[in-house]
């Protein structure tokens, strides 16, 4: 039953069955693999009801602020560290908005479960079992539906609901360890094999860059040459010599996903590197994640024409490939990154906007132009 104070949120109703099918596939896979325990499998009604309440709560304001909450669908017995309310609360927009100030910190989820046919908020938890449905309010009118992966603590985004827009995140490809050349990656864009195999590191860097909210640019260049220096203003004010290798060493010594699940120092290294992108100018690393410079001013390479158009795409199902001038994607930072990749076609540029948008620039030989690939749907 919907919150009686509001009409149904139409996008939640439209998306619910598709999201239910996603969870059904993952639960069937978990059963085949014998994975246990996992969270209860949500039905379409639960998905619609939770998203409906979250959406209307996101439009309310408490003490001048929009709520930021995370709702997890599981019974209180499914998590050993649950904080349980003596009296469970109805799942309403008003109730969620009132609770929001207490649970807006990252990693805190409001537990929701169906009791006697009614959806109720039973308390809070930090721990979620794999495949737990989570509906997170990112900002007013913007929800992300996600779940914990079967074998890792990280989340996998399923869909983004923004007003009347529904964006489904496709299943992304994991390149084989022996891959060479330019190959598909978990970011939904083709990358050089070393970067594609370290795509989880790039996701963490991207999320950390996006989180500091100041905008920033990270340029990833080949380790084998220094041609990139032709595309930056000399002298480089904050050049690093020798290259700073803290993150590079952790990536080299770790085992991909296990590295970032088990080693707090890796998180600190990621945040330290991402923090440098808040300085005016671009941060430059090589494909081994060795830091070469930061606060670097990008300049058009001598004799190179100015980039006039890029091919804009997005990591969501059904995304169109739209040619556009770089200034339509963002400001000076985006234009500079597009120019850098146009001039240095074996480089990759990651650009965070202050408004939360995130774009990866790569040269596309197939299209003979720079490709601007928006990935914020993966990072929320």
Image (cartoon, rainbow, N blue to C red):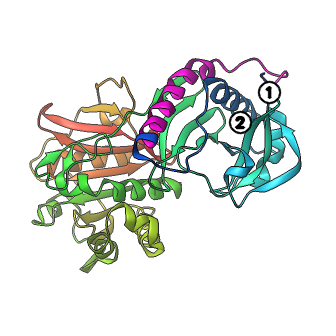
Magenta-drawn segment: 3-30
Kindly identify which residue carries mark 2. 58
Check residue 266 for magenta coloring: no
- Residue 271 in view, yes or no: no
Vertical relation: 253 (above or below) 337: below
The one of 266 and 334 positioned closer to us in this rendering: 266
Q: Secondary structure at mark 2?
A: helix
In terms of depth relative to the viewer, which is nearer, 153 or 305? 153
Q: What residue is rendered at 55% in x and 47% in y?
A: 38
Say what secondary structure mark 1 lies in: loop
- Describe residue 134's horizontal placement relative to residue 368 as left or right: right
Coordinates of residue 91 in the picture (x, y in percent): 80, 34
Residue 315: quarter of image: top left
Q: Is residue 361 above or below residue 23?
A: below
Tell which of 325 and 244 is nearer to you.
Answer: 244
> Which residue is identified by label 1?
117
Q: Is residue 250 above or below residue 187?
A: below
**Secondary structure of the magenta portion, mostly?**
helix
């Amino acid at each position: 039953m919907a919150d009686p104070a509001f009409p149904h949120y139409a996008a939640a109703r439209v998306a619910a069955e598709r999201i239910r099918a996603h969870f059904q596939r993952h639960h069937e896979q978990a059963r085949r693999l014998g994975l246990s325990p996992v969270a209860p499998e949500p039905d379409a009604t639960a998905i619609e009801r939770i998203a409906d309440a979250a959406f209307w709560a996101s439009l309310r304001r408490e003490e001048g602020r929009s709520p930021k909450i995370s709702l997890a669908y599981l019974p209180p017995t499914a998590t050993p560290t649950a904080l349980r309310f003596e009296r469970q609360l109805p799942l309403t927009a008003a109730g969620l908005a009132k609770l929001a100030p207490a649970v807006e910190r990252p990693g805190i989820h409001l537990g929701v479960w169906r009791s006697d046919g009614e959806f109720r908020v039973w308390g809070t938890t930090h721990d979620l079992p794999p495949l737990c449905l989570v509906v997170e309010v990112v900002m007013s009118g913007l929800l992300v539906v996600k779940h914990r992966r079967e074998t890792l603590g990280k989340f996998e985004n399923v869909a983004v609901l923004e007003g009347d827009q529904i964006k489904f995140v496709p299943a992304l490809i994991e390149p084989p360890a022996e891959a060479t050349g330019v190959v598909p990656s978990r970011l939904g864009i083709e990358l050089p094999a070393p970067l594609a195999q370290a795509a989880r590191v790039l996701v963490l860097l991207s999320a950390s860059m996006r989180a500091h909210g100041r905008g920033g640019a990270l340029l990833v260049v080949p380790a084998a040459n220094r041609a990139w220096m032709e595309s930056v203003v000399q002298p480089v004010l904050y050049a690093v010599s020798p290259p700073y290798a803290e993150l590079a060493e952790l990536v080299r010594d770790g085992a991909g996903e296990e590295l970032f699940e088990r080693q707090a120092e890796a998180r600190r290294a990621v945040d330290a590197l991402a923090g440098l992108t808040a300085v005016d100018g671009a941060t430059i690393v090589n494909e081994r994640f060795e830091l070469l410079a930061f606060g670097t001013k990008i300049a058009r390479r001598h004799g190179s024409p100015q980039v006039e158009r890029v091919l804009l795409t997005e990591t969501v199902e059904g995304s169109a490939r739209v040619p556009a001038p770089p200034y339509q994607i963002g400001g000076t930072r985006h234009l500079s990154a597009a120019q850098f990749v146009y001039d240095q076609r074996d480089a990759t540029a990651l650009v965070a906007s202050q408004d939360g948008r995130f774009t990866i620039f790569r040269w596309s030989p197939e299209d003979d132009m720079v490709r601007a690939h928006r990935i914020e749907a993966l990072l929320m």
